[in-house]
Amino acid sequence: MDIKKIVSQSKFAQVGFVVNDIEKTKKQFALLFGCEVPPTCDCGTFDVTQTKIYGKLAPDAACVMAFFDMTPGVQLELIQPNEESSVWRDYLNKYGEGIHHIAFQVEDADEVARRLQDEMGAEFEQEGNYGDGSGKYIYLLCKDTLKCRLELLQSFK
């Protein structure tokens, strides 16, 4: 599978922000969008998420999230991490609040991640399962090639 095929089989799904105060920030976005304030949800428990950072289990890395449905299948995600090291916390500590990643829905996140690593020099950062176990995510830093962080989303259902 080449990169063109990966892109053609992927669907743009999300822009993610990391924030210090999710309650305050989601109210501001709701005002901007003229919509209801979405609920805040937690990322789930480690027994389900099995979060790994740079390949090592990270049982204490966690966050709360809120989602705005922008168009069918495309979301704006707000993430407020806890104080433990994670791709979210480390970014927030280094750069402050702001856009953290763009995400794509893919059929096989592991294969796409491997190809992006091999063909584009993507750096694996963090992976885990959705809090309800219905899918998985992988964060890849593509700083040199794409100038951003990608999140790959794979639904199991």
Image (tube, rainbow, N blue to C red):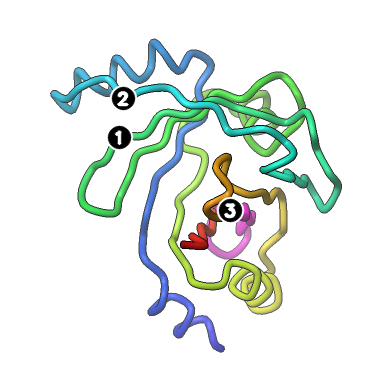
Split into 4 quadrants, where in the image is the N terminus? bottom right
- In reply to whether residue 102 is colored magenta, the answer given is no
Camera-side residue of 156 and 31 = 156
The residue pinned by badge 3 equals 137
Please report the bounds of the magenta region as a residue range: 138-149
Q: Residue at x 80, y 34 (%)?
A: 59
Badges 3 and 1: C-beta atoms under 8 Å apart? no
Mark 2 lies on a secondary structure that is loop
Q: Residue 76 at what x, y percent from top left?
A: 35, 39
What's the residue at 54%, 87% (across, down)? Answer: 2
Tell whether position 143 is magenta: yes
Residue indicated by mark 1: 68
- Image x and y of residue 5, in percent: 45, 85
SS for dot 3: strand
Examine the image and state in which quarter residue 28 appears. top left
Using the image, determine if residue 26 lies above or below residue 110: above
Q: Amino acid at mark 1?
A: Phe
Residue 56 in percent (x, y) is at 86, 47
The kind of residue on which mark 3 rests is: Tyr
**Please, what is the three-letter code of the amino acid marked with disc 2?**
Pro
Q: Which residue is mark 2?
A: 38
Disc 1 is placed on an element classified as: strand
Q: Earlier in the sequence, mark 3 or mark 1?
A: 1
Q: Of label 2 and label 3, which has the lower sequence position?
A: 2
